[in-house]
């Protein structure tokens, strides 16, 4: 959170976190294409030639007021590949909320667990209490063959009783529900701090 009283503006940061190819960028791109262009910035993608996120994706948009301040929500994704652990830590600096995007494929559970452990470690290093921090669990790719059950994903991944959503981000299912809930939790938390 960064407050600019001169502009009556508050910058808030929500990060999509999860393993590579779980649908973080797809979430961001779908939201971007369905938010009024007058309320949002262009999207910035930094990708490799293989079309994978190398550092982050970014979008900014405005909505409502918080105690007279205009909130600007900055949405980021992190690269999910193991070699980008340091980048994920840097992108989490100053984060106000997280949407954890898990891949529902049965062969992806190791990757889900690895990045979730990485998220918890990085939040703690940034002095956040994970149990009190705004985290949303999104179980994406519900349309894959043999998708793991929601009960299993929830029991295995959601150790902090976070709000949970099923999603098929490529179709937009669960995208706005996850984002709206993340925004609500962040705004509630910020109101107690401003």
Image (tube, rainbow, N blue to C red):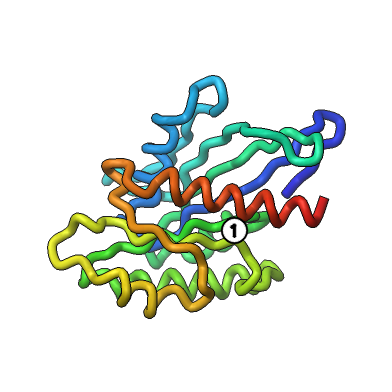
Q: Residues within 10 Å of mark 1 (few under 14, many from 20)?
A: many
Identify whether 156 is placed above or below 49: below
Is there any visible trace of residue 81 in the rendered image? Answer: yes
Is there any visible trace of residue 84 in the rendered image? Answer: no
Look at 18% across and 58% down and name the residue there.
144
Q: Nearer the viewer, residue 78 or 139?
A: 139
How far across and how far down the image is residue 186, in percent?
Answer: 64, 53
Identify whether 3 is placed above or below 103: above
How far across and how far down the image is residue 159, in percent?
Answer: 48, 78
Q: Is residue 104 left or right of residue 144?
A: right
Q: Is residue 106 left or right of residue 6?
A: left
Residue sitting farthest toward the left: 145
Q: Which residue is mark 1?
A: 92
Look at 39% across and 30% down and name the residue there.
33
Give the total of numbered labels: 1
Identify whether 169 is placed above or below 142: above
Look at 30% across and 73% down and name the residue there.
109
Look at 28% across and 50% down and name the residue there.
168
Residue sitting farthest toward the right: 6
How far across and how far down the image is residue 170, in percent?
Answer: 28, 43
To which quarter of the image does residue 47 belong? top left
How far across and how far down the image is residue 76, in percent?
Answer: 52, 47
Element on which disc 1 rests = loop
């Amino acid at each position: 959170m960064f407050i600019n009283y001169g502009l009556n503006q508050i910058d808030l940061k929500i990060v999509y976190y999860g393993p590579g190819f779980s649908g973080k960028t797809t979430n961001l791109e779908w939201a971007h294409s369905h938010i009024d262009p007058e309320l949002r910035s262009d999207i910035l993608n930094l990708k490799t030639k293989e079309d994978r996120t190398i550092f982050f994706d970014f979008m900014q948009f405005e909505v409502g007021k918080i105690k007279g301040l205009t909130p600007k929500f900055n949405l980021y994704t992190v690269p999910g590949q193991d070699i980008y652990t340091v980048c994920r830590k840097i992108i989490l600096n100053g984060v106000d909320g997280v949407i954890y995007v898990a891949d529902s494929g049965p062969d992806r559970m190791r990757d889900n667990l690895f990045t979730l452990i990485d998220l918890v470690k990085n939040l703690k290093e940034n002095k956040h209490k994970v149990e009190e921090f705004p985290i949303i669990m999104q179980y994406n790719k519900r349309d894959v063959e043999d998708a793991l059950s929601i009960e299993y994903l929830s029991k295995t991944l959601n150790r902090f009783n976070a709000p949970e959503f099923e999603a098929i981000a490529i179709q937009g299912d669960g995208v706005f529900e996850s984002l709206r809930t993340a925004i609500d939790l962040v705004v509630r938390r910020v109101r107690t701090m401003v």
